Amino acid sequence: MRRANHDRMAAPAMSVCAQCGSPATPHQACPSCGMYRGRQVIEISDEAASDNN
Ligand SMILES: [Zn+2]
């Protein structure tokens, strides 16, 4: 029972990724494309996109 309600609103400032346009935190890497400030900081696997395998 340590979950306070502040855990739900931990990200008050939501931004949009400049690369893919997905909602992402302003000062963190985009969870969708892994880009942050024009750099690839997260390796995103394209396995989800290859659905027609
Ligand atoms: Zn993105």
Image: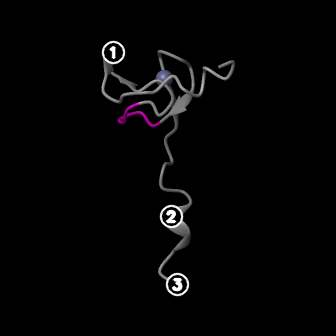
Give the residues drawn in magenta, as a range: 25-29
Q: SS for tag 2?
A: helix
- Dot 1 amino acid type: Gly
Q: Quarter holding the C terminus?
A: top right
- Name, please, the residue furthest toward the front: 53
- Colouring method of the image: one colour
Q: What is the CA distance from the residue labelled 2 to the residue labelled 3?
A: 12 Å
The rendered magenta stretch, by its main secondary structure, is classed as: loop
Crowding near the residue tagged with mark 1, few <14, some 14–19, many ≥20 C-alpha atoms within 10 Å: few
Q: Is residue 32 magenta?
A: no
Q: SS for tag 3?
A: loop
- Whether pointer 3 and pointer 1 mark residues with C-beta atoms closer than 8 Å, the reply is no
Crowding near the residue tagged with mark 2, few <14, some 14–19, many ≥20 C-alpha atoms within 10 Å: few
Name the residue tied to disc 2. 7
Apparent side of residue 50 relative to residue 12 in the rendered image (left or right)? right
Name the residue tied to disc 3. 1
